[in-house]
């Protein structure tokens, strides 16, 4: 059987164990803080993703509306040019018929 340890050895062992516990407690506290920060960051990233997704949908809708508006202006321009061409053609045909005496 082993000889019992002295009181001084026991106190030294106890002191070292307590110091080790304090170091580990500090490390655990740092890890907990990092875990909280990572969780907060993950929530922020999720909110950002939802916001960007919403923005993309809105941008698609605006693009569709813009295409409709641009098409309407182009269609109006083509219609006006058609009326002008018809008017010019009618005038030319009218002049030709008037020269021919009809």
Image (tube, helix red, strand yellow):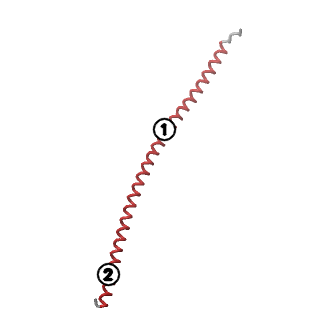
Packing grade of label 2 (10 A; few <14, some 14-19, many >=20) is few
Q: Is residue 75 above or below residue 35?
A: below
Eyeballing the image, is 48 above or below 6? below
> Residue drawn 59% across and 24% down?
21
Of the image marks 2 and 1, the number of the one nearer the N terminus: 1
Q: Which mark is residue 90?
A: 2
Q: Secondary structure at mark 2?
A: helix
The numbered dot on residue 40 is 1
| Mark 1 crowdedness (10 Å alpha carbons): few <14, some 14-19, many ≥20 | few
| Residue 3 position in % (x across, y down) | 71, 9
Seen as rendered, the residue at the extreme front is 102
Which residue: 62% across, 18% down?
Answer: 14
| Disc 1 secondary structure class | helix
- Tell me the distance, in whole angstroms, between the alpha carbons under discs 2 and 1: 74 Å
Left or right: residue 27 versus residue 3 is left
Q: x, y (%) of residue 10?
A: 65, 15
The quarter of the image holding the N terminus is top right
Residue 62 located left or right of residue 95: right
Image check: 97 left or right of 51?
A: left
Residue 80 position, x and y percent, is: 34, 73
Q: Quadrant of the C terminus?
A: bottom left
Closest to the observer: 44 or 34? 44
Residue appearing at x 52%, y 37% in the figure: 38
């Amino acid at each position: 059987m082993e000889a019992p340890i002295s009181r001084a050895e026991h106190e030294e062992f106890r002191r070292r164990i307590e110091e080790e516990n304090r170091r580990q407690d500090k490390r655990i506290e740092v890890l907990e803080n990092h875990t909280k920060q990572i969780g907060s960051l993950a929530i922020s990233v999720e909110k950002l993703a939802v916001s960007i997704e919403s923005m993309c949908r809105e941008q698609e809708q605006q693009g569709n509306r813009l295409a409709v508006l641009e098409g309407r202006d182009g269609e109006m321009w083509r219609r006006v040019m058609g009326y002008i061409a018809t008017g010019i053609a009618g005038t030319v045909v009218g002049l030709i018929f008037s020269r021919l005496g009809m």
